[in-house]
Amino acid sequence: MPTSKDVAQAAGVAQSTVSYVLSGKRPISEKTRKKVEDAIEHLTYQPNAGARALASRRTRVIGLVIPFIPELHMASIMEFVSVIANTARRYDHDILLVTEDEGAAGLQRVVGQQICDGLILMQVEGDDERLPVVRSLKVPVVLIGIPHDPSGLVCIDADFEMAGKQCVQDLAAAGHDVICVLDWQREVVDRHVNYVERFRSGTNQAAESIGVKMLHLPGGTDRDVIADSVDKALAETTGTPAFIAPDGTVQDVLRRVLSSRGLTPGKDVSVIGSASPTLAELQPIPLSTIDLRPAEVSRRAVKIICDLLEADSQGPTESLELVPTVITHRSSTLRPPRGS
Amino acid sequence: MPTSKDVAQAAGVAQSTVSYVLSGKRPISEKTRKKVEDAIEHLTYQPNAGARALASRRTRVIGLVIPFIPELHMASIMEFVSVIANTARRYDHDILLVTEDEGAAGLQRVVGQQICDGLILMQVEGDDERLPVVRSLKVPVVLIGIPHDPSGLVCIDADFEMAGKQCVQDLAAAGHDVICVLDWQREVVDRHVNYVERFRSGTNQAAESIGVKMLHLPGGTDRDVIADSVDKALAETTGTPAFIAPDGTVQDVLRRVLSSRGLTPGKDVSVIGSASPTLAELQPIPLSTIDLRPAEVSRRAVKIICDLLEADSQGPTESLELVPTVITHRSSTLRPPRGS
DNA sequence: TTGAAAGCGTTACCAC
DNA sequence: GTGGTAACGCTTTCAA
């Protein structure tokens, strides 16, 4: 493997000149620049990352802590991961995977060994055990998810409160006066992820201001539980029933149960679920969808951390960003308002 | 951040001794070892990865090239990623994400800059454009997926031929004499991933030796296409119809179509699909499932590459490993054989 | 069993 | 505008 020394020799310049050509941190005459660039091309030189990291004290690597919770819609986690990796490349950074199994010790490890310059944590819980460690780290960390106490932390997430409002408003506008929300799975709720609560608060605020009735029923992936919830909802509804299923996994089960009750979404019943890349394509039915915008959240998370890295931020930063959600109308053929 | 020099000073030994205590490449007296370990603990010393990589010419990082194809069941990709990352840690390695967007150039980049010591490529196509580059790389590469010409390459994948056989045998044993396979999605087939062909070959071999009729019909996520395929299959079947849907995504659609035809899997119709972590939990119905064992494939891929790294393999290695698949009987209550 | 010192391939400061 | 050179923090050879 050729080194910058080889390049310098081939181009007949000093090694430092090669470095400056590459980094652009010093004006270089057109003539020498050309010589160096030719030599680089000719030798197919690529700078050694380790040496660079050692000398510059920057790895240009960001650690991404991924969750592994079977109950968490894996497809959507993968979308985060994928978008984060791609966006990082745009900022000339790479992504190192850190699995949640390693816990807080994993964070200390990758930061301590200076394998990466900063961290992104996915699926941060309301009272995440890693937060004390995160606060103590001397590198930028961006959390996806809002903990109960976000002080001293940089957080970003979809605006679940807005999402809840939008869902209720959409259904109310379509004429429903009883709206049923199927909760997230037990496993998710038990983790005290904040968004469950934020979503619920959004739905309830909207329901109150509009004057429709909200029904919060148990969700989960257990078909019987969902069936039970559906039946309860049907019993409480006189007009066309309406369901909100923000959890992608719950949504799957709900569809099946409705279908087993002979109910066709978009016709006999309204359903709003969160858009999931795979399932969106499977929807043969004209429905609204709440888009929680995982891609946008991912992109912004990367931007934030890269900005912090650029700024060489040392002191404790603090910020909280909520990404607006949107209702996607796949079709406008929900039931017309009652009485019309 | 403390360095090994600091540790040496604190312990009253040479810097090299600290290094040897850590690496174990040299016998150390119990006494000095203790001194050094105490100093490490006390200073919370962690070796600098860049410096280590520079000096040892090993990063202990493995590049993982992930696909991003919306049509590819993202949940199962995530399972690969997650298991690979965890297994790598067992071998004291980390995983760096390389997105497929970067193409062959991405491979050259991470290897050329010596960001990682080796690569794992997921979802390798039959005639993958990256293969020439892979062959030219001077680091170990493990492919998940079997290209048409695996010469000079190290490949591993689930044994799709065995999977095909097992599905047909299972259904034939349950008394079906017409068995319908819903192909993978167009997008997958068009990529000429080898496993489509291998699976088909397995089903056909088994069908021939047992003497049942095979029907290969178009798959995909288009509900109409699946509905069409289902109807064709029903028309060709006198007894209980039987479907094989190896593609997780296709499987989702199939279930919906069958249900819309009033057919309950496990009762009026037999269905074998590939186990997907999420969907397995959603199956309320007693069915066989073909387990393509993504976790096992992932684990072995990591083991292979770590072994190669250990062996400091320079010369071109070549190997091809097929991981046995298994039929999981979630219940034995398929229809009894015809005539019983 | 241990120590000293020479790299490893960059970056960045100090001269010119 | 450019060159020389001292770090950066580790591993490993050579001596003792």
Image (tube, coloured by chain):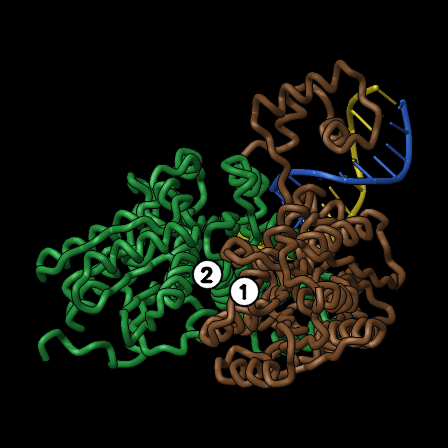
Chain colours: A green, B brown, C yellow, D blue
Query: Which quadrant of the figure has residue A106?
Result: top right
* Camera-side residue of B198 and A110: B198
The kind of residue tagged 2 is Ser
What amino acid is labelled 1 in the image? Met
Instruction: Tell me the residue that label 2 is attached to.
Output: A76
Residue at screen point 59% across, 78% down? B185
- Asked if residue B157 shows in the view, the reply is no
Callout 1: SS? helix
Where does the C terminus of chain B fall, quadrant-wise?
bottom right
Q: Residue furthest top?
A: B31
Q: Chain of mark 2?
A: A
Q: Foreground residue, A212 or A306?
A: A212
Location of residue B132 by image quarter: bottom right
Check if mark 2's residue and mark 1's residue have beta carbons within 8 Å: yes
Q: Position of residue A65 (x, y in %)?
A: 50, 48
Q: Is residue B57 visible?
A: yes
Q: Quadrant of residue B167?
A: bottom right
- Between B338 and B275, the one nearer to me in the picture: B338
* SS category of the residue bearing label 2: helix
Q: Nearer the viewer, residue B114 or A51?
A: B114
Instruction: Report the Cα–Cα distance between label 2 and label 1.
Output: 8 Å
Q: Which residue is at 83% across, 76% downward?
A: B208
Instruction: List x then y, in percent, for residue B169.
Output: 76, 65
Residue A318: percent from left, percent from top = 30, 46
The numbered dot on residue B74 is: 1
